[in-house]
Image (spheres, rainbow, N blue to C red):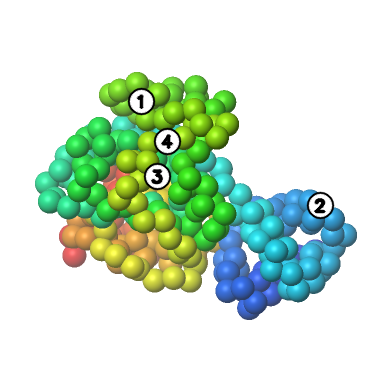
Amino acid sequence: MHNPPGDVDIELRMLIEAVFLKYNYDFRDYTGASQKRRVLAAMRAMDCDTVSALQARVMHDPAAFTQLLQFLTIPVTEMFRDPDYYLAVRRLIVPFLKTYPSLNVWVAGCSTGEEVYSLAILLHEEGLLERTQMYATDINPDALEAARRGVMPLDKMRRYTENYQKSGGTRAFSDYYTAAYGGALFDRALVEHVTFADHSLATDAVFAETHFISCRNVMIYFNRRLQNRVLGLFHESLCHRGFLGLGSKESIDFSTYAQRFESLAKRERVFRKVAS
């Protein structure tokens, strides 16, 4: 016998539907458990006794929606996270990227920019940054603004330095930032060719032909249907034999696009589009 959903689950679905109808942000295909945790955290922080009370506030106050959005899109990120991934990019993808006169790289779900600056540093060290146009996209305008600013917490620099060294970095990591604004301000030259833009993987279309897409630890929050949609977007966006990098817990095996990518580094989740 099928158990009917509890009150909280019903209210949750109504909230997510309301957010979509009113603000055109689509969280309907995000996974339930993680989304529920985030909404309950928002409820406590915003002093609402029920999800319905939270919905009422969000519906009538755009500022409340902005606050909720910070919870629904909590970024978990760090520079050169999973250094083996960046090592695989250097060894397996960069030699091919060097054969192109100009490059388009898309960092999808860029959050507060740690991955953007990491890739920019890698491309700079490989002599590719000057000819690369990078697109850094996210659905959270506050996160995009933080990414544009490029100020990271100073207390994280030791960890980031270790990651950078393990990822095959060739210089002193401190060359890339100066202490400013109470944090580490990253060199503006790194993002000279970066376009930061609002883009939803749930609702928006492809906007450019790309050679390499890095989308890490974003799809873990999506259900199968949305993951499939996103892989379709990436497949469409990538040029002939383009490259895709995913997060360490993400897989394409279940997807209808599984046969359209070959694995270059299984553990590091680096793939290449199969020639059509």
Q: Residues within 10 Å of mark 1 (few under 14, many from 20)?
A: few
Which amino acid does the dot numbered 2 rest on? Arg
Residue 220 locus on image (x, y percent): 52, 51
Q: CA distance from mark 4 to mark 2?
A: 35 Å
Q: Please give the name of the residue rendered at 21% of the width and 52% of the height, measured from the top-left corner.
A: 103
Q: Which of the 4 image quarters holds residue 231?
A: bottom left
**Label 2 close to label 3 by CB (< 8 Å):** no
- Residue that appears at 44% across and 28% down: 178
Q: Residues under labels 3 and 4: Cα distance?
A: 11 Å
Q: Residues under labels 2 and 3: Cα distance?
A: 32 Å
Q: Please state, as top left, top right, bottom left or bottom right, where the N terminus lies in the image.
A: bottom right
Categorize mark 4 by other alpha carbons within 10 Å: few (<14), some (14-19), many (20+). many
Q: Residues within 10 Å of mark 3 (few under 14, many from 20)?
A: many
Quickly name the residue at label 4: 186
| Residue at the disc numbered 1 | 175
**Kind of residue at disc 1:** Asp
